[in-house]
Image (cartoon, grey):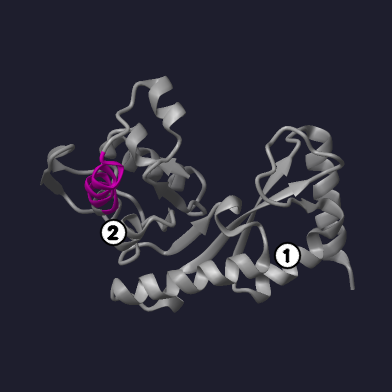
Amino acid sequence: MAATAFHAPGSLARMAASIDEISDGRFVFGVGAGWNETEFRAFGFPFDHLASRFEESFEIVRRLLAGERVSFAGRFHRVEDAVLLPAPRRRVPLMIGSIGPRVLSIALPHVDAWNTWYTWYGNTAAGFAAQSAEIDAACARAGRDPGEVERSACVLVTVGLGGERPHEVPPVDAERIGAHLNDLRDAGVDEAIIVVDPVNERSIRTLGARIRDLANAP
């Protein structure tokens, strides 16, 4: 997931097209406006008008990735007769990571998928279902069929005691990951992105083995 505020839109589009090419068309480009003020301040990026900055950048990025030649003059971004060469071999799928009403209204008419962070929906299937219903309504307001937008959820999973991440919401124990993913599927999740705590080789191998066992179960 890329915060559009951290790169020039032309650079973002070029990077996305390149990643899609080297991944043989397996890339989904996740974007958002950004939210972590500490990170913005640390790297010297402006932390004002985030939705407006996103709106301008997103228009340039999505049009370049669609193969258009783009001229755009906005308050924060300007490009003139910009084009990606070599041209993207396909329209790179776009995912929006946001629950902000304005950002959603900008992105939902165009994206292929929506992603939610685990703290936004409480890391529960019921919380996701409620938030997904809000996305349905936002799609309708944006003139988009909700069924056209895939649903993606980040899931906080602990292996052992965890300890590297703050647990603002109850984490899912690795031993319960199968049941939890089934619950999320029933709530409408098309894709689960696992956020592991702690993030180290042992925890990743442990969780990977657990998921393989579930996949191979009769």
Front-most of residues 198 and 78: 198
- Picture coordinates of residue 62, whole percent (x, y): 29, 53
Figure check: 215 above or below 62:
below
Q: Give the residue displayed 84% in from the left and 35% down from the top.
A: 202
Question: Gap between marks 2 and 1, in whole Å?
Answer: 30 Å
Asked if one can make out residue 44 in the rendered structure from this viewpoint, the answer is yes
Residue 106 circle label: 2
Specify whether residue 60 is painted magenta.
yes
Mark 2 residue type: Ile
Residue 25 circle label: none
Q: In which quadrant of the rendered view does residue 85 lie?
A: top left
Mark 1 residue type: Leu
Asked if one can make out residue 190 in the rendered structure from this viewpoint, the answer is no
Figure check: 21 above or below 213:
above
Whichever of callouts 2 and 1 sits on the residue coming sooner in the sequence is 2
Please identify the quadrant where the C terminus is shown. bottom right
- Picture coordinates of residue 115, whole percent (x, y): 50, 57
What residue sits right under mark 1 in the picture? 181
Figure check: 168 above or below 132:
above
SS under mark 2: helix
Q: In which quadrant of the rendered view does residue 36 lie?
A: top left
SS under mark 1: helix
Residue lying at the far front of the rendered structure: 168
Q: How many marks?
A: 2
* Residue count near mark 1 (Cα–Cα under 10 Å), binned few <14, some 14–19, many ≥20: some
- Picture coordinates of residue 67, whole percent (x, y): 25, 53
- Picture coordinates of residue 46, whole percent (x, y): 30, 29
Q: Give the residue displayed 78% in from the left and 45% down from the top.
A: 158
- What kind of secondary structure does the magenta stretch mostly adopt? helix
Q: Give the residue displayed 87% in from the left and 42% down from the top.
A: 160
Magenta span of residues: 49-62
